[in-house]
């Protein structure tokens, strides 16, 4: 089952996708949030290219495990996107995914400036991988 993950921010949305078997997550791209929310051609093309069966969106959580201040906005936007796409929606804990993404990109030698557009899609791939792993663990 191919999953498409969205790391929804106020300005950008990071996009990641799983392989068809639902085992490995990979970063895809970063799109302007306004285009994703409007169902613009760029986002529709991602949907057409990858043909996901489920949408997985990051749920902003505090370190204490409670919904963060952005959670309500992000979850409402995720429901709107899933409804427009006709896809089932799941949420994944996105705690620390952006800081881990920055660490990974820094290790690859990227500067803060050059990683700016990449952090969101790497973060999406990280929480998608955790979500995929939890699904695989549940079936073992």
Image: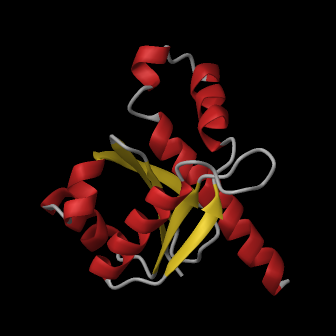
Q: Is residue 17 left or right of residue 94?
A: left
Q: Is residue 116 above or below residue 61?
A: above
Q: Is residue 87 left or right of residue 23?
A: left
Is residue 6 or residue 110 the one in the foreground?
6
* Residue 106, image quadrant: top right
Q: Which residue: 60% across, 60% down?
A: 128
At which x and y percent is residue 98?
59, 38
Q: Residue 79: x percent and y percent? A: 41, 74
Please state which of residues 77 and 126 is positioned toward the viewer in this rendering.
77
- Above/below status of 121 relative to 99: below
At which x and y percent is residue 18?
Answer: 53, 66
State whether residue 35 is above or below residue 135.
above
The C terminus is located in which quarter?
A: bottom right
Q: Quadrant of the N terminus?
A: bottom right
Q: Residue at x 41, y 16 (%)?
A: 113
Choose between 25 and 80: the one closer to the eye.
80
């Amino acid at each position: 089952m191919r999953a498409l993950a969205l790391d929804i921010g106020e300005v950008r949305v990071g996009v990641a996708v799983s392989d068809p078997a639902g085992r490995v997550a990979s970063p895809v791209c970063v799109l302007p949030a306004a285009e994703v929310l409007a169902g613009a051609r760029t986002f529709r093309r991602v949907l057409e290219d990858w043909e996901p069966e489920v949408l997985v969106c990051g749920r902003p959580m505090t370190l204490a495990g409670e919904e963060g201040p952005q959670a309500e906005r992000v979850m409402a936007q995720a429901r709107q996107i899933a409804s427009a796409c006709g896809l089932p929606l799941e949420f994944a804990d996105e705690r620390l995914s952006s800081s881990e993404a920055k660490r990974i990109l820094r290790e690859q030698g990227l500067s803060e400036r050059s990683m700016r557009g990449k952090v969101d899609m790497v973060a999406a791939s990280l929480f998608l991988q955790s979500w995929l792993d939890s699904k695989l663990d549940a079936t073992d």
